[in-house]
Amino acid sequence: MGKGRVEAFSDGVMAIIITVMVLELHAPHSPDFEALLEVAPEFLAYVLSFVYIAIYWNNHHHMFQVVRRVDGGVLWANNALLFFLSLVPFTTDWMGENHFVAAPVALYGASLLLPAIGYSVLQARIIHVEGQQSGLAQALGTDWKGKLSPALYLLGIVLAFFLPAVSEGLYVLVALIWLIPDRRIERWLAKRESEGKEASPASE
């Protein structure tokens, strides 16, 4: 089964998620700059969530560069990831509207944890289909970022009930860790391309 429709559908859903989030931003009624402070929490929550959705799009795109085929399990794992991501606009709005208090910050952390788990499940399913010698399996290696992120989300969820600001700091930290597109896959693709160029003269 080809991967093209999976990528196209995922691109569309993530674009819609970002659109929904920006539509939740409302300009203040007062025509002065001080009024912007009233909507600052909503804007900051939107920026953080936009970065997260962009990170997932970047890494999803990079991952599928090394994927050759998918099956029904991959389709459903991908749909689960998109479902979890579709919850982010709701938690973003609730957290921003309530100025980063405990319960919304905790729920926001849960809405970040679920896609992280979903992404790991999607990776595992792809490797199951393509095998341990597949490009994705070789590129991922130990995947320390994929293992560290859920732990930091869990810590942030717990701390939200005592120190919401620290939780937000942890969510920002994870975003910074993932901000650069996955270089493991880029390195694997570069290595494969280099090996291909070296092998081509010998095959002539």
Image (tube, rainbow, N blue to C red):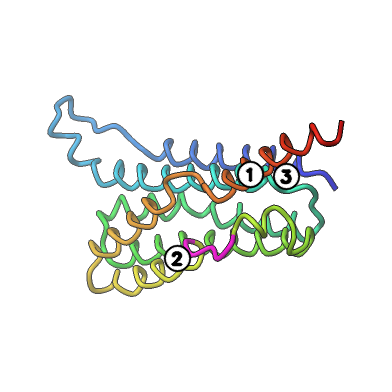
- Image depth: mark 3 or mark 2 in front: 3
Q: Which mark is residue 191?
A: 1
Question: Residue at horizontal 34%, vertical 74%?
Answer: 158
> How far apart are the two marked residues, 3 and 1, measured between alpha carbons?
26 Å
Q: Point out residue 50 in the picture as x, y percentages from the top left corner.
A: 42, 42
- Image depth: mark 3 or mark 1 in front: 1
Q: Nearer the viewer, residue 195 or 47?
A: 195
Q: Point out residue 150 in the picture as x, y percentages from the top left corner.
A: 46, 67
Mark 2 secondary-structure assignment: helix
Q: Which residues are magenta?
A: 141-145
Q: Magenta segment: does it hold 153?
A: no
Q: Do the residues bearing badges 3 and 1 touch, measured as CB atoms within 8 Å?
A: no
Q: Point out residue 76 in the picture as x, y percentages from the top left corner.
A: 73, 58
> How far apart are the two marked residues, 3 and 2, measured between alpha carbons?
25 Å
Q: Which mark is residue 110?
A: 2
Q: Which mark is residue 6?
A: 3
Q: Point out residue 168 in the picture as x, y percentages from the top left corner.
A: 29, 59
